[in-house]
Amino acid sequence: MRIARFSTTDQTPRYGVIEGDPGAPDAVVTELAGFPLPPFELSGTHHPLAEVKLLAPVVGSKIVAVGKNYAEHVREMGGDSPPAEPVLFLKPSTSVIGPGDAIVLPALSTEVHHEAELAVVIGGIVRRVPVERALDAVLGYTCANDVTARDLQRSDGQWARAKGFDTFCPLGPWIETELDPADLAIECRVDGELRQSGSTADLLRGVAELIAYASAVMTLLPGDVLLTGTPAGVGPIRAGNRVDVTIAGIGTLSNTVIADPVIGDGGSDA
C-alpha cells in the first residue's frame, strides 16, 4: 500500500492511499480518515493523482538519523573502520520538505552535500523494543535526502547545525507499507548524473537493530522518522541542480536546489 500526504486546491493537508500505477493517468488518491494507522479507514473521496500536490509523507515529532552505517561511506569520509555502536543524531521537524520542494542552500555554508537514504516511518509508540519485535513498529518506508553542510560538520565537530537547516530533510514521495527493507537498491542522481548507487543489504546495522537501539534511548512516536544512513558517493549540490533519490520498491524523490537570496548561487565544488 502506498500512503501519501497531499493537498488539493484548498491547500489542506490530507492522507490518502494511492490506487493504481502512480505513473498512469488514471491513478487516484483515496482519502483516509485521520492519521494513517491500521486499521486504515477509507473515506470514499477520490482525487486524480495528477491533480494533487504531494507533500512530505509525514511531519513527525522528530527525525532520528544514523551516521556511518555503510562501510564504503565511512571510508570515503576518512574513517578507518565503522563505529563500534550506531551513531545517532537528530534533525528537526522543520528541516522536512516534500517532493518537488526546493532545498535552500544556506548563507552559512559553501559546501552542501546530498545523502540518499532509506527512511523508516514509525507507526506506534515504541520504547525499549527488542530486535525481534522491532519491525512490528514500522508503518512503512520512504525515500530521504539527509542534506548536509559538510564544511560546518567539519568545523563544528558535531552535526546539529550542519544537518539541521530548514529544507535539509526531503522525504517522499509516499510511504510504502508492504516492503522488505533487507535488500533495496538506492540511487542518487544530480541532473541525471549517477552519484550514489548502493543497497540496504550493505547496511552495517539493519532496520530492526536500529529501531531497537534508538528506542532504548528515546521513545519513538507515530510519524517519527528513522534515517538509516547513506551509501558512498556523497557530493556537492549547487543552485539550479535537480536531485533525485530513487529506492527500489518505493519510487523517486525529486527536489530542486535554490540559492539563499542572501548569497547568490551558494555552494561550491570543494
Image (cartoon, rainbow, N blue to C red):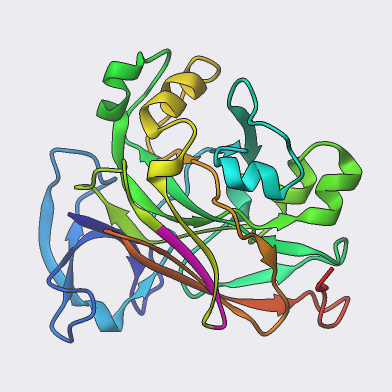
Q: Residue 32, located in which quarter of the rendered image? A: bottom left
Q: For this view, does 23 lie left or right of residue 191?
A: left
Q: Is residue 251 left or right of residue 31?
A: right
Name the image quarter holding the N terminus.
bottom left
Rendered position, 256 above or below 168: below
Question: Where residue 143 sits: x, y (%)?
Answer: 42, 57
Residue 262 lies, in percent from the top left, at 87, 76
Task: In this rendered view, identify the residue nearer to me: 244 or 215.
Answer: 244
Extent of the magenta region: 186-191
Q: Residue furthest right?
A: 155
Where does residue 45 sit, x and y in percent of width and height? Answer: 13, 67
Please state which of residues 225 and 70 is positioned toward the viewer in this rendering.
70
User: Going 25% across and 27% down the picture, which residue do you hit?
Assistant: 136
**140 is higher (above) or lower (below) than 144:** above
**Location of residue 113 (image quadrant):** bottom right
Main secondary structure along the magenta-highlighted residues: strand
Horizontal side of 180 relative to 43 (left or right) equals: right
**Residue 70, image x, y percentages:** 55, 42
Q: Is residue 8 covered in magenta?
A: no
